Image (cartoon, helix red, strand yellow):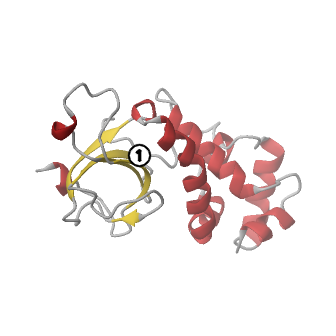
Amino acid sequence: MTDTEREGETADGAVVLDFLPHGRTDDDRPQYEKEPLAYALDTETFALSELVVDGDGGVSIGDRIDVTDNAAIDHVRDIDYDDLPSGAQSELEYVVADLVETEEQRFVDFYNDAQPITLRLHQLDLLPGIGKKIRNGVLDERKRQPFESFADLEARVDGLHNPEDVLVERILEELREEDLKYRTFVRRERE
């Protein structure tokens, strides 16, 4: 299986975080030997990737691309947060926030569908700022009726402010921290 034939990829693909037309700055090879690189975030699994791009590939920051079926991409390599260039790291928070906003129903459904992980730990407990009181508020309210939007969630659960920001913060934490015991949003290829 080649790098571009990765299993489980969706047609939605990835969002480009950064594009380096002259390759990595720490690459000591002559300029003509360096390959253009793009760094991307998978929209479904939140996996980070380094993409070798053919020429400029028509790729720019913020583009949504299909990494599995794109003639401009020579190969894909999964990377960790620490492997991202600083430009991609700074863009990451905005891209994640935009994904949570544009795919609101997907993330509202997380609040509707979150389940216990162990007898003492619930998926909602993993979210920053969510304690027992707010977790129980979410669980009680979703029994009455599923949440329809972030605004509905915020209105019905006392103490839960900006539920989308809570998710963005958790996704970023899962991307940045390699040694987390539980992951809800980010799938790591090498685990």
Amino acid type, residue under disc 1 in the picture: Arg
Compared with 104, 182 (above or below) is above
- Residue 164 figure quarter: bottom right
Residue at x 59%, y 47% (from the top left corner): 93
Residue at x 68%, y 42% (from the top left corner): 125
- Residue 72 figure quarter: bottom left
* Residue 13 shown left or right of residue 126 in the figure: left
Name the residue furthest right: 158
Compared with 18, 105 (above or below) is below
Compared with 37, 15 (above or below) is below
Residue 118 location (% of width, % of height):
57, 39
* Residue 116 shown left or right of residue 71 in the figure: right
Residue at x 12%, y 50% (from the top left corner): 2
Compared with 138, 39 (above or below) is above
In terms of depth relative to the viewer, which is nearer, 75 or 108?
Answer: 75
Residue 191 location (% of width, % of height):
33, 35
Q: Which residue corresponds to mark 1?
A: 187
* Residue 86 shown left or right of residue 58 in the figure: right
Check disc 1: other Cα within 10 Å, few if <14, some if 14-19, many if 20+. Answer: some
Whether residue 118 is visible? no
Residue 157 location (% of width, % of height):
84, 60
